[in-house]
Image: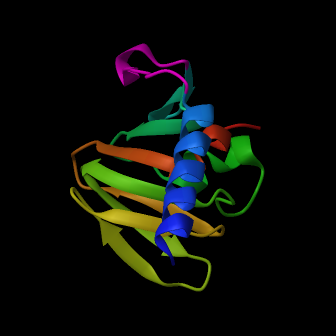
Amino acid sequence: MSTAEHSTAEHSTAEHSAAEHSAAEHKDFAQADEVRAFTSGQVELLHIGGSDIGRLVLQPGWRWSEHVKPIAGTDLCQAPHFQYHVAGTLRIEMADGTRFDAGPGQVTALPSGHDAWVVGDEPVVIVDWWGASNYARP
């Protein structure tokens, strides 16, 4: 890319970013824009930067197929997720039978078609960039 092209590309990107985020935003999950509670858990949603981000807090004993399936009305979770795992251990089972555990400091990208449950006695806390806006919504 020539210097002129590079400069134009940077300028175009800067204009695009400025148009999307004209002001700084600062929010706290403790004062979520929306909270959806369900048996043994909840999702707290923030609407920020033209997008939604969610924090899921899932208590020991929680399982998607027992506690959210009746709300979603599907056999498996159909929401794709891109998640950072803050606390606890979440066991995830995909439709094809693949199973793994995700814990603190790990990131998961999950396509549609999975079940999940809390393993152990510690609550699971997850920050989710995809899928949270539709989570536990009928």
Point 50% across, 48% down: residue? 129
Of residue 62 and residue 129, the one placed in the foreground of this image is: 129
Point 56% across, 60% down: residue? 9
Of residue 92 and residue 26, the one placed in the foreground of this image is: 26
In the rendered image, residue 79, in percent from the top left (x then y), is placed at: 65, 56
In the figure, 24 relative to 56: above or below? above
In the rendered image, residue 128, in percent from the top left (x then y), is placed at: 46, 47
Q: Is residue 135 left or right of residue 3?
A: right
- Which segment did they paint magenta? 22-33
In the rendered image, residue 14, in percent from the top left (x then y), is placed at: 52, 44
Asked if residue 50 shows in the view, the reply is: no
Extreme top residue here? 31
In terms of secondary structure, what is the magenta stretch mainly?
loop
In the figure, 23 relative to 113: above or below? above
Point 28% across, 42% down: residue? 123
Of residue 60 and residue 19, the one placed in the foreground of this image is: 19
Colouring of the image: rainbow
**To which quarter of the image does residue 107 belong?**
bottom left
Q: Is residue 83 left or right of residue 19?
A: left
Magenta-drawn stretch contains 24: yes
Q: Is residue 101 left or right of residue 14?
A: left
**To which quarter of the image does residue 56 belong?**
top left
